[in-house]
Amino acid sequence: MYVNPEVYSGPPADSRDPNEMAVYAFLDQLGISYLRCDHDYANTMEDCKAVEAVLGVPICKNLLLTNRQQTDFYLLLMPGDKPFKTKDLTKQLGCARLSFATPEQMKQLLGAAPGSASAFELMHDKEGKVRLVIDRELLAGEWLSGHPCFSTSTIRLKLTDFLERFLPAVDHTPTVVDLPWPEAENL
């Protein structure tokens, strides 16, 4: 996978999907500084390792989940290298078994392409249908990263800007959970 070694501040100069450009415009409107890295389509966390090296920040895993009835939706943010087990999350949220939302639901709710969900797309969730869930471990870091609707760019910004400026502007309050590492379960 090719990753452009150059890091940019600000939106791309070339023409991109309107939903992606809306993310940059919204961050600019809020006065939130960010850095951007462009790359080939990053489909896996392994692909994101090269992006991590260029941006100098751990990549955040973003999962759009839904309940069995597909009436409740959750966007989970967690460390990219931490394994995800549904049972660990459902227990803490007090909900039934969760599964991955469909690509159509991701596009409809967040305006994101499959495999590209991130917290930045919450700006497209004007009706508040998606509940933001953050693993507490992410809150210990300085930065947050994610794709702006498409997995061909990754942006990073200060976690404090995300929590104190971005989330209030999109009217989402995170639910914080403590997802265990597998070795912690065996102690």
Image (cartoon, rainbow, N blue to C red):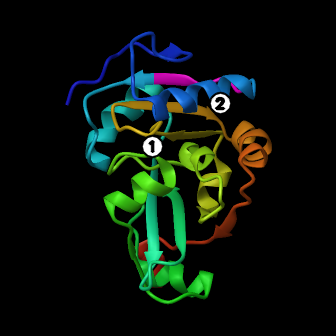
Numbered tag placed on residue 26 in the rendering: 2
Residue 152: image quadrant is top left
Q: Which residue is mark 1?
A: 59
Is 156 within the magenta? no
> Residue 186's spot in the image, x, y percent?
42, 85
Above or below 51: residue 132: below
Q: Quadrant of the N terminus?
A: top left
- Which amino acid, by three-letter code, is at mark 2? Phe
Q: Main secondary structure of the magenta part?
A: loop
x 72%, y 48%: residue: 167
Residue 93: image quadrant is bottom right
x 67%, y 22%: residue: 28
Q: Nearer the viewer, residue 28 or 80?
A: 28
- Which amino acid, by three-letter code, is at mark 1? Ile
> Can you tell which of label 2 and label 1 is closer to the viewer?
2
Numbered tag placed on residue 105 in the rendering: none
First to last magenta residue range: 32-36
- Sequence-wise, the earlier of marks 2 and 1 is 2
Residue 129: image quadrant is bottom right
**Residue 80 in sight from this viewpoint:** no
x 44%, y 50%: residue: 117
**Residue 172 in sight from this viewpoint:** yes
Mark 2, secondary structure of its residue: helix
Mark 1, secondary structure of its residue: loop
> Residue 121's spot in the image, x, y percent?
54, 45
Q: CA distance from mark 2 to mark 1?
A: 21 Å
Above or below 127: residue 66: below
Above or below 64: residue 54: above
> Residue 100's spot in the image, x, y percent?
37, 70
Q: Nearer the viewer, residue 48 or 107?
A: 107
Label 2 crowd bin: few (<14), some (14–19), many (20+), radius 10 Å:
some
Is 175 situated left or right of 98 in this image? right
